[in-house]
Amino acid sequence: MLLPDYHIHTARCGHAAGRMEEYIEHALALGLKEIGFADHIPMYWLQEGDRDPELAMPECDLGGYVAEVERQRELYPDITIRLGIEVDYIPGHENQARRILERHPFDYVLGSVHYVDGWGFDNPAYIHRYETCDLDELYRRYFKLVQQAAQSRLFDIIAHPDLVKKFDFKPTCDLQGLYDETARAFAEADVCAEVNTAGLRVPAGEIYPAEGFLRACRNNGVPVTMGSDAHLPNQVGHGFDRAMELLTRVGHIKIALFNERNIFFIIP
Ligand code: ZN
Ligand code: FE
Ligand code: FE
Ligand code: ZN
């Protein structure tokens, strides 16, 4: 098992469990050579009083998160540990995100669309909204936001780029057209797509993104990074065998690594 896992959360976010050491020990047991923590950024687009402590760490904790990753590097010299972060893309709040990102020496930044026009569509607490929403419109709107996220230049990687399928509500519109358009936007903005295995653990039951999306990435020369989106130590590297099968089936996709926001590639 040689693929790096670049999407690992920590207990600081308020909805993951286990100490950082436990995530690292699990990675070592699997034989991973490289991992990256990518915990949720503080909810910078809301007033402090309106931020949900179960969705992301408080702003005063961010320095502690960075310092803790740096400390783990010293404790575990046998594995490369990257400092990443998962950043919600909220249109109109780009400068606030940029100011936070400038303050710390991140190796990479994952950009995520978890909200469509204020609706946290991936949160089980708001799943009832699917009953009344126009699914075609939701998918079109979601992929537009993903494209805008890429164009914002805030991010190195777009995480789980078809997260909208999470609860398995399917639209009737042509998804391949949206995939192609989105992969072209990634190529133009020089961002990677994330292959995220958390999709295997939710009703969708398949890796993010769909195979058609990855074919579009291949056709447009968009590289990928790998992530389990672990919120528990034993989820590190989860489903990476399936991800590898998928990547092999699609073929000719480069797997990217990051150091201080510079990209390089795994030589297969
Ligand atoms: Zn989370
Ligand atoms: Fe996410
Ligand atoms: Fe995540
Ligand atoms: Zn995530």
Image: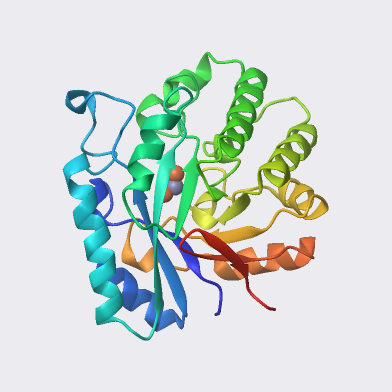
Relative to 118, 47 lies left or right: left
Relative to 78, 205 lies left or right: right
Number of on-image labels: 0
* Placement of 219 over or under 82, stated as above or below: above
* Placement of 57 over or under 260, stated as above or below: above
In the rendered image, residue 122, in percent from the top left (x then y), is placed at 45, 34
12 or 129: nearer the viewer: 12
In the rendered image, residue 254, in percent from the top left (x then y), is placed at 70, 65
Q: Residue furthest top?
A: 132
Question: Looking at the rendering, which quadrant does residue 72 occupy?
Answer: bottom left
Q: Which residue is drawn at 63% across and 48% down?
A: 209
In the rendered image, residue 187, in percent from the top left (x then y), is placed at 72, 46
Residue 58 visible in this rendered orientation of the protein:
no
In the rendered image, residue 228, in percent from the top left (x then y), is placed at 47, 60
Q: Quadrant of the N terminus?
A: bottom right
* Placement of 225 over or under 268, stated as above or below: above
